[in-house]
Image: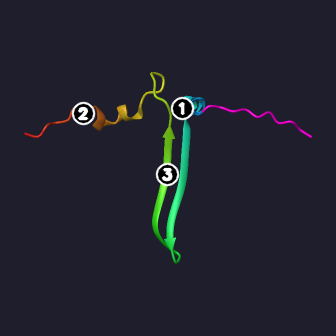
Amino acid sequence: MTVVERREIALVDLLDRLLAGGVVITGDITLRIADVDLVRIDLNALISSVNEQVPSPFELLPAARAPREEPA
């Protein structure tokens, strides 16, 4: 008989560990009726913390850097 150690971890600690290393979530969902595809959803998400070593990818987009013009 093997004894397995059971560890409990707080949700805050789990989120801290996941954000420190980053998490990639991928998936496909297809809704169909009578073998006819109605809706297809492809999910690709990267969840990570942002700091000086890992800058936000949105800062690199040209639209994010350009100043917004106000309508006259």
What residue is rendered at 62% in x and 31% in y? 10
Which residue is outermost to the top? 52
Q: Earlier in the sequence, mark 1 or mark 2?
A: 1
Three-letter code, disc 3:
Leu
Which type of secondary structure does the marked residue at label 1 adopt? helix
Q: Tell me the residue that label 2 is attached to.
A: 66
Q: Magenta segment: does it hold 2?
A: yes
Instruction: Tell me if residue 71 comes above or below residue 54 in the rendering.
Output: below
Q: CA distance from mark 2 to mark 3?
A: 29 Å
**Dot label at residue 43:** 3
Percent from the top left, x then y, of residue 42?
A: 49, 55
Q: Residues within 10 Å of mark 1 (few under 14, many from 20)?
A: some
Q: Secondary structure at mark 2?
A: loop
Prevailing secondary structure of the magenta residues: loop
Image coordinates of residue 6 in percent, x first then y, are: 76, 34
- In the image, residue 34 sits, relative to residue 14, either above or below, namely below
Q: Which residue is mark 1?
A: 19
Query: Looking at the image, which is closer to me, 31 or 56?
Result: 31
Q: Which residues are magenta?
A: 1-10
Label 3 crowd (10 A; few <14 / some 14-19 / many >=20): few
